[in-house]
Amino acid sequence: MLSLLMILLAGLNPDSALASSTAQFTSLVLGIQCTKTLAVRPLEPLERDMLSIYNVVYESMVVIDDQYLPQSCLAESWEHSSDGKNWTFHIRKNVTFSDGTPLTAGDIVASAQYILDKANDENASDHGFYANLKYFVSSISARDEYTVVVRAARRNFGLLYEMTFPVVPASQVGMDQPIGSGPYRIEEFKAGDYMWLQANTNWWKTQPTVRDIMVEFHDTASSVIESYEYARVESIFTRSIAGAQYKTGTASISMKYRTNQLECLYMNNSSEELTLEVRRAIRYVVDRSKLVTNIYSGLVEPTNFPFYPGTWMYNSELDAGFYRDLTMARQLLEEAGWADSDDNGILDRIDSEGKLHNLHLSFYVYEEPDNDVRTEAANQIAAQLAEVGISCKVEAMTMANLRDRLSSGRFNLALVSFAMDVSPDPGFMLMRGNTGNYCRYRSTKMNELFEDLRLKTSQEEYRQKLMEIQALFYEDCPFICLYFRTGNVITRHMYTTCRDVREYELLRGIESYQE
C-alpha cells in the first residue's frame, strides 16, 4: 500500500494543498473509520462511511438534491397511476456499467429484488440497510429493457425517496465487488487497509477532474483524526466531538454535515405522572441550547420535530412556540395538581390512595461507542427539571436493557436516538402500535393524518399533510425532539459545491467539482 499511496500523494504537496490553493487537484487521499467491511457489498452495507464511498461507484434511479427533493438519475422520468398504485420509471438508454455493458431495467429490478428478498426473509437476523424498501414496494418488474414498473405498498410521494438504492448488474447482485455505473470504479480493495477508486472512463456524464480517490481505513475515530493531524490523509469524515476543534481557515476546511440520527427525550404517555400538562411543562424546561454548547460542542442541529430543519418538510412557523419558560412550566405543573406541600424542593400531590406522592421520574439512557456523552446530557436535563421540582434518577444501561424497558413500558423518561429513514415519514414513532412508538402515544387523529399522508402522490399535498402532522405533534407533545447529530468533513481540499452535505453522501459533488 505504501508505494501506491506515495504515487497518489505525489500530487498532494501539503504546502500546495491548503484551503487557499487555487490549483486544481486530481487525487484525494481520504481517511475513514472502517473495521467491519470485509467485502464490497453495496446492497448490504455495514458501515455508514462506506456508504459515501459506494455512492460515487454505484448509481440509483433517483437522487436527492440540495432541497432534499427527488431528482432524476438512472431514471430520466417517471409517472404514476391516478390512485398511486403503479409507478412507471423510464431508464436512460445511454448508461453503461464501468466495463461498458449497457445498464437496463433488468439490472434495476434484480438489485431491488435482492434487497426485498433479504428484507422479507423471516429467518434473517439482519434485514439490511435498505430494508425499508419493503414498506413501499409490493412488487417491481421490467416492462421492457428501459421501463421499470413498481407496484406500490405505500402509494405516495415518499416512494421516490426509496428509489435511491444502488444498482449493480443483475448477474452480480450476490457477488463481492460488483461493478457500478457511477463516476468512479473500484481499482483495488484490501479489507482493513484501503480502497482505491479511479475515474470511470465509461461514465455517461463528463469525466471527473479528480481522477483518483484513495480511501485509508482506520480502526478508531481517534486514529482517523490523528491521520489528518499528521498529514497522512488529506480529508476525513468524523462524528467525533474532537473534530469540532477544526475550523475553516488557510490550512483546513471544515464542512458540517447532517446525519439521520435524531436524539429524543421519550416520555411514557401512559404513565400516571406524565399527563399532557406535565409533558408540556417538561418541554418548557429543557434548555437545548446548553446541551448543544456544553455537551456536544455544537455538533448537533436542534430540531423541534422529527424532520431536519431548513428543509421543505419542516414546519418552521411553529418554532416560535418552543422556548424555555420556567414560569409557564410551573403554571402547567400546578394545573396538573402538583405542588411542593412539604417544602422539600420536590413537587407532590395526594394520589388515588390518599398518600402523598412525589413527582419522581425514572430516567433511562444508553451509551454508544461513538456517543459517550449521552449520559452527561441526561444528567443535565435532570438538573434542569429539578429547577421546577421534578426529581429524576438517571440510570445508564445497555441498549438491549433499555429496549426491554421501552418495550414493556417500565420507564418514565428515556433519552434515545433513532436512525430516520430517507423517506420523510415518521409514522413508526407516532402511529398507535408502531415499532418506534415506545412512548405509547395514542391519537386517532394522528393515525388518520398518516393514513392520509400515505395517499398523497404530489409533493405539495404531501408537504401540507406533514405540516398538519407537526401541528398536532406540537399540541399533544408525545415526546420531545432535541437535535440531529452532525459530523464534520475536514479537508485540505474543497471538493464539492453541494450545499446540503449529508451522511451517506459525503463525497457528493466531487465528480463535477472544478476549482
Image: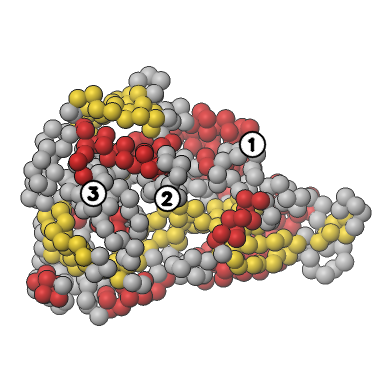
Outermost residue, front direction? 123
Tell me if I can see residue 496 in this picture.
yes
Q: Earlier in the sequence, mark 2 or mark 1?
A: 2
For residue 175, the mark is 3
**What number is the disc on residue 443?**
1
Locate residue 84, reporting x and y percent.
39, 24
Which residue does the numbered mark 2 point to in the structure image?
Answer: 126
Quadrant of res 330: bottom right
Q: CA distance from mark 1 to mark 3?
A: 46 Å
Q: Is residue 347 above or below residue 201?
A: below
Q: Circle 2: is it few (<14), some (14-19), or many (20+) Cα within 10 Å?
A: few
Residue at 33 percent of width and 53 percent of height: 45
Under circle 2, the secondary element is loop
Residue 229, quarter of the rendered image = bottom left
Taking the spot 17% from the left edge, 28% from the top edge, the residue there is 145
Counting from the top left corner in percent of width and height, residue 95 is at 13, 38
